[in-house]
Amino acid sequence: MTSNTALTSSNLNICFYGAGSMAEAIVRGLINKSVARPEQISMLNRSDKGRLDFLNTTYGVQVASDQQEKQIRLQHADILVLAMKPKDAAEALKALGPLLHEDQLIISVIAGLSIRTIQSLLGRKQPIARTMPNTSSSIGLGATGISFSSEAGTELREQVISIFEAVGIVSVIPEEQMDILTGISGSGPAYIYYMMEAMIAAGTEGGLTPEQARELTVQTVLGAASMMLQTGEDPALLRKAITSPNGSTQAALEIFAAAGFTDIVKAAVHRCAERSQEMGAAVEEALS
């Protein structure tokens, strides 16, 4: 079974319990990449019927707002994606547990909620995939970390990977590495945007129009990322290739070095990971 046919080949039903922006991004990717057909997908939320109507009209997916119909869809889904807010998780999972059968796969995109806590709230040792996508998933360029419970076998793991490969790349990691992954890819887009803000500001200060500064910055970041991806080169080598001795690029890099750029970035990544761990502990304490 190849990853991009794992769902269509077996006509599995996938139900999104929560219908926010990340759930929509995944659904868009599944349909656009032909990993799943709209009729295989259902989406539920607590009470926002307008949101469900939009998703039904836009993507052709099945939706349910009636409580009885929700329960039927949850019971008959082969794969359940938990995409509700953390504050709603305890009540939802406790109610969900009695509806499940042992073969149903649970995928969580709830930040900070461990596999152990999910199984505890469900009241059963269900196969679980804990995931951490990032916002670039909404345009099919995401990076998702996935950790599996011991109950998830090879076929179930392939199904999960196929879902998230529809919106980007996937890294399967031990659950204890989920926080450092959050520091790299989960929050990483914000670091890049922060630097882009500064580059655009410098460009306008130097006389470029805001539009020119933005366009040049965006293309520069896109080109640099694409160069690294296409060549496979180490970023240090690519940096050195455009840094002439005593040139303008070297002068700029010396400013970064004097400010401790490498140490600052590493400290930010590690602090993000620490905060992710703290938030996860707080979520689990609140739900216990």
Image: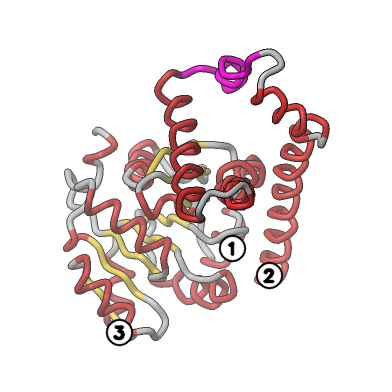
Tell me which corner region of the image, top left, top right, bottom left or bottom right, holds residue 56: bottom left
Are dots 2 and 1 in contact, CB under 8 Å?
yes
Left-right relation of 35 to 25: left
Residue at 44% in and 44% down: 152
Left-right relation of 90 to 160: right
For marks 2 and 1, give the CA distance. Answer: 9 Å
Measuring from the top left, give residue 260's x and y in whole percent: 81, 34
Measuring from the top left, give residue 116's x and y in whole percent: 61, 55
- Which quarter of the figure is the C terminus placed in? bottom right
Q: Is mark 2 on a helix, strand or loop?
A: loop
Callout 2 amino acid: Ser
Q: Is residue 110 visible?
A: yes
Q: How crowded is mark 1: few (under 14 residues within 10 Å), some or many (20 or more)?
A: some
For marks 1 and 3, give the CA distance. Answer: 25 Å
First in sequence: mark 2 vs mark 1: 1
Where is mark 2, residue-wise? 288
Residue at 33% in and 79% down: 51
Measuring from the top left, give residue 266's x and y in whole percent: 74, 37
For marks 2 and 3, give the CA distance. Answer: 27 Å
Residue 227 colored in magenta in the image: no
Q: Residues within 10 Å of mark 3 (few under 14, many from 20)?
A: few
Measuring from the top left, give residue 212's x and y in whole percent: 46, 49
Residue 239 colored in magenta in the image: yes
Give the magenta-colored segment's residue range.
232-244
Who is closer to the viewer here, 196 or 163?
Answer: 196
Callout 1 amino acid: Ser
Where is mark 3, residue-wise? 68
Callout 3 amino acid: Gln
Where is mark 1, residue-wise? 120
